[in-house]
Amino acid sequence: MDTDRLTKLALNYLALFVLVFLVLAAVRAVVGDVGFWIELAIVVVVALAYRPVVTRLGVAPSGWE
């Protein structure tokens, strides 16, 4: 196992985790309480969009290629 590769993957997943919480906090600050299902939809959209965006920006870890 390549420790450097695993570290880069772990950092990207940590960044995704933090991004989800930041987006949810921003939505709650702007809109207020939106309910569980809307928050779940936001989490799914952010999680699905993260990898293509990071890949397009050219900062994706080599483990995603």
Image (spheres, grey):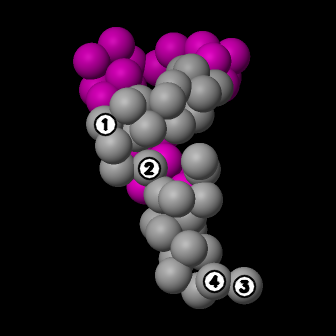
* CB contact under 8 Å: marks 2 and 1: yes
* CB contact under 8 Å: marks 1 and 3: no
* Residue 30 image offset from top left, x and y in percent: 27, 18
* CB contact under 8 Å: marks 3 and 4: yes
- Dot 1: element: helix
Report which quarter residue 41 is drawn in: top right
Q: Nearer the viewer, residue 36 or 9?
A: 9
Would you place residue 40 above or below residue 16 in this image?
A: above
Q: Amino acid at mark 3?
A: Met
Residue ID for mark 4: 2
- Dot 2: element: loop
Mark before the other along the chain sequence, 1 or 3: 3
Residue ID for mark 1: 57
Residue ID for mark 2: 60
Say few, some or many: other residues with alpha carbon within 10 Å of mark 3 (under 14 / 14 to 19 / 20 or more): few
The reply, left or right, for residue 56 in relation to residue 61 is left
Would you place residue 4 above or below residue 22 in this image?
A: below
Q: Amino acid at mark 1?
A: Leu
Q: Amino acid at mark 2?
A: Ala
* Residue 46 image offset from top left, x and y in percent: 51, 28
Q: Residue at x 48, y 69 (%)?
A: 8
The answer to whether residue 46 is visible is no
- Residue 1's tag is 3
Q: Residue at x 47, y 20 (%)?
A: 33
Mark before the other along the chain sequence, 3 or 2: 3
The reply, left or right, for residue 44 in relation to residue 29 is right
- Residue 13's tag is none
